Amino acid sequence: MEIFIENIQDKIEVSDEILELMEKAVKTCLEHEKFEHPYEISIILMDNEKIREVNTEQRNIDKPTDVLSFPIVDMYEGVVKSSQGDFDMDEGRIILGDILISLEKAKEQSIEYGHSFERELIFLLTHGVFHLLGYDHDRAEREKKMFDKQDTILKILNLERHK
């Protein structure tokens, strides 16, 4: 398994501890899903302006957002549905896709919701991972399933929302 994290912003400091927590969160999501294929995921940390540009380009929404996911493999709720997609045959890995996160937006939302930056960042990251695995929040029952999975991962990582 390969998890690539690229930090292309300079507004929020990214410590080694945060990078380690991010890797642990991705691995925990995939282990919890019993995803046994070797995989590759790319995570790009950016600022509000850069994610706004991508959001405009990809979704025609001209405003910053917190997280964008770009799945490559056709999956539905953790199951590969098609052999179409990107497989790194040399390495024997499935390239699941890319997750873009605005660290500025994560910081803003952590303050707005009254919890730690780390909790918000990992919430957004797990959201992105579950999208790559074919989960969605397009209907109420699917939204509940996806958010329950995220809550489980946050609990495992001791990053629960404190009320």
Image: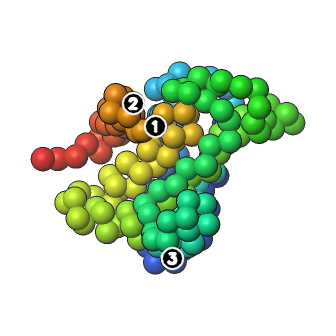
Residue 87, quarter of the rendered image: top right
Q: Amino acid at mark 1?
A: Asp
Outermost left residue = 163
Q: Are marks 1 and 2 in contact (CB under 8 Å)?
A: yes
Picture coordinates of residue 114, whole percent (x, y): 19, 60
Q: Which residue is mark 3?
A: 49
SS under mark 2: helix
The quadrant of the picture occupied by the N terminus is top right
Residue at image x 22%, y 59%? 113
Cα distance between the residues tagged 1 and 3: 25 Å
SS under mark 1: loop
SS under mark 3: helix
Picture coordinates of residue 91, whole percent (x, y): 81, 36
Q: Which mark is residue 142?
A: 2
Of mark 1 and mark 2, the one earlier in the sequence is 1
Nearest the eye: 14 or 61: 61
Residue at image x 69%, y 30%? 38
In the picture, measured across the screen, residue 140 lies left or right of residue 129, that is left
Residue at image x 53%, y 21%? 34
Q: Which mark is residue 136?
A: 1
Camera-near label (3 vs 2) is 2
10 Å crowding of disc 1: few (<14), some (14-19), many (20+): many
Cα distance between the residues tagged 1 and 2: 6 Å
Nearest the eye: 96 or 144: 144
Of mark 1 and mark 3, the one earlier in the sequence is 3
Residue 18, quarter of the rendered image: bottom left
Instruction: From this view, report whether residue 56 is shown above or below residue 69.
Output: below
Q: Amino acid at mark 3?
A: Glu
